[in-house]
Image (cartoon, rainbow, N blue to C red):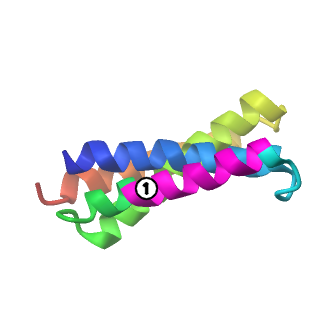
Amino acid sequence: MQWVFLVIAGFFEMGWAIGLKYSQGFTKLVPSVFTILGMIASFYFLSLSLKSLPIGNAYAIWTGIGTVGTVILGIVLFKEPVNAMRLGCIGFIIIGIVGLKLVSPS
C-alpha cells in the first residue's frame, strides 16, 4: 500500500505545481486554495508512504513523478516547447524512478 500512497502523493505534487502557475503568485483565490490543498495532500500521502519506504528512494520517486508529470502537463496545458533533448531527459528521469523502485525493499 505504501507504493500506492507514494504514487498518489506524486499526482498531488503535479497538481499543486500546475496550480502554482494558475494561481499567478497566489493572487487568484480559487487556484491558490486548490494549490495549497494539493500541497497538503501531497505531503500527507508522502508521509504515509514513508512509514515503510526508505526516505531517499521515496523522496526521489515522489519528486520524479511530480517532475515528469509537470513537464508533460506544461507541454499540454501551456504549450511549452517539445524537443528531443527535453523528451530524452524525461526518459532518464523515468528510468531513475523505475530503477529506484526495483532496488527498494518491499
Which residue position is annotated with label 1?
A: 62
Classify residue 15 as left or right of residue 33: left
Q: What residue sits 56% from the left and 49% below the top?
A: 38
Which secondary structure type mostly characterizes the magenta part of the structure? Answer: helix
- Asked whether residue 31 is drawn in magenta, I would say yes
Q: Position of residue 64 (x, y in %)?
A: 48, 53
Q: Position of residue 65 (x, y in %)?
A: 48, 47
Which of 46 and 32 lies nearest the eye of the viewer? 32
Can you see residue 97? yes
Q: Position of residue 45 (x, y in %)?
A: 37, 53
Q: What residue sits 51% from the left and 45% below the top?
A: 12
- Asked whether residue 45 is drawn in magenta, I would say no
Classify residue 10 as left or right of residue 25: left
> Start and end of the magenta stretch?
30-44
Q: What residue sits 83% from the left and 31% below the top?
A: 79
Q: Quadrant of residue 62?
A: bottom left
Q: Residues within 10 Å of mark 1 (few under 14, many from 20)?
A: many
Q: Position of residue 83 (x, y in %)?
A: 75, 37
Which of 45 and 86 lies nearest the eye of the viewer? 45
